[in-house]
Image: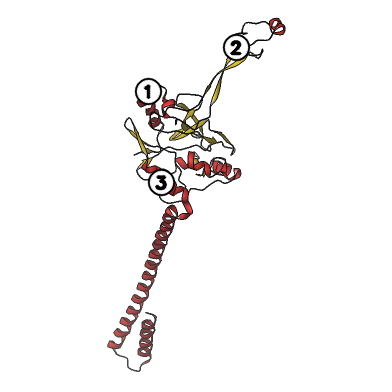
Amino acid sequence: MRNLISFIYLISASLCFTQLETPELGLLIKRVDSLTNLIITERAENQERIKILTNQLKEKEDQLIRLEKQIGNDDIESINASSNLKKEITIGNQVWMTANLNLSYFRNGDAIPESKTKEEWIAAGKLGKPTWCHYGNDPKNDEKYGKLYNWYAVSDPRGLAPNGWKIPEFEDLNLLDTYLWGDVGLKLKNDSGWNSWNVEERCKSCIGWTEDQKRAKKCSSCNNKGIRISKTNSGNGTNSSGFSALPGGFRNANGEFDKIGQHCYLWSSTPQFTLYGRYRILSNMEDELIMNYATKDFGMSVRCLKE
């Protein structure tokens, strides 16, 4: 292209300096100039088209890299978690995963930022950015409980749930009460893996004693402590629903972990006012599915529902 333009310029210059000046020569010079301008214009347009195509190719390459990472050896958690997609349980008209979500990529292949420190977790919450973490910053906890996500990850438009699944709305979680009816938490909790707890009652032998009576003699049942342990509750459920809920605990807005072994917190995709997201709790000490809401910078488990 460059050589052609140079050749045309050379012809044009030669014609301009020739001693022959005729109407035909002037017309030829105009045609040469017109052709030169056309070539220059087309070259500029081609360069712009090449630039656009190059950018599109770069976007496709970036997307391919993200997808390769999602299924590559550098994201073993995602591969392990994908096996959970094959395990599902039907409750009423709903189909649920039987394990908490354990993915570190959005549906479109973008990586979800991990908060490895307390400072990173707090910063993500203040900026309203999605993030996830291992409970106690220990990856081994993911194998049993899945990852903890803040609500900004739950509500991100790129999609936290894998293809064919969704994050349940609060009403979806409420339907579990309707389908299971009575002792819902007991039916949802796994039959092992929950912390036990003791039921304490006032001692029936000395419940009516005065202080003088207590000083005069010792109670044979409680040694004047006033309480006795009546029984130990396992904290487990029956898992008659097949939901297999486990107590993965939570992470608060200050980056502190708590309640592993005791509580299972399940985010919904439903906000509560501006600053909060709605969730439901399963407890080792309760046989119900409890309603609540928390600020969006808390970290909780996610259980996906089939679309």
Q: Residue 205, percent across and down?
A: 60, 8
Q: Secondary structure at mark 1?
A: loop
Q: Secondary structure at mark 2?
A: loop
Rendered image quadrant of residue 197? top right
Q: Amino acid at mark 2?
A: Cys
Q: Considering the image in quadrants, where does the C terminus appear?
A: top left
Distance between mark 1 and mark 2 Cα atoms:
35 Å
Distance between mark 3 and mark 1 Cα atoms:
31 Å
* Mark 3, other Cα within 10 Å: few <14 / some 14–19 / many ≥20: some
Residue placed under numbered mark 3 in the picture = 82
Q: Considering the image in quadrants, where does the N terminus appear?
A: bottom left
Q: Is residue 235 left or right of residue 4?
A: right
Rendered image quadrant of residue 171? top left
Q: Mark 3 or 1 closer to N-term?
A: 3
* Mark 2, other Cα within 10 Å: few <14 / some 14–19 / many ≥20: some
Frontmost of labels 1 and 2 is: 2
Please say whether residue 78 is visible from this viewpoint.
yes
Please say whether residue 146 is visible from this viewpoint.
no
Q: Amino acid at mark 3?
A: Ser
Along the viewing direction, whichever of 215 and 94 lies nearer the viewer: 215
Distance between mark 2 and mark 3 Cα atoms:
52 Å
Along the viewing direction, whichever of 20 and 238 lies nearer the viewer: 238
* Mark 1, other Cα within 10 Å: few <14 / some 14–19 / many ≥20: few
Residue placed under numbered mark 2 in the picture = 203
Q: Residue 126, percent across and down?
A: 56, 41
Q: Residue 89, percent across and down?
A: 35, 35
Q: Secondary structure at mark 3?
A: helix
Question: Label for residue 34?
Answer: none
Dot 1 and dot 2 residues touching (CB under 8 Å): no
Residue that lies at the very extreme toward the left in this rendered image: 24
| Residue at the image point whose x is 41% and y is 25% from the top | 184
Residue placed under numbered mark 1 in the picture = 181
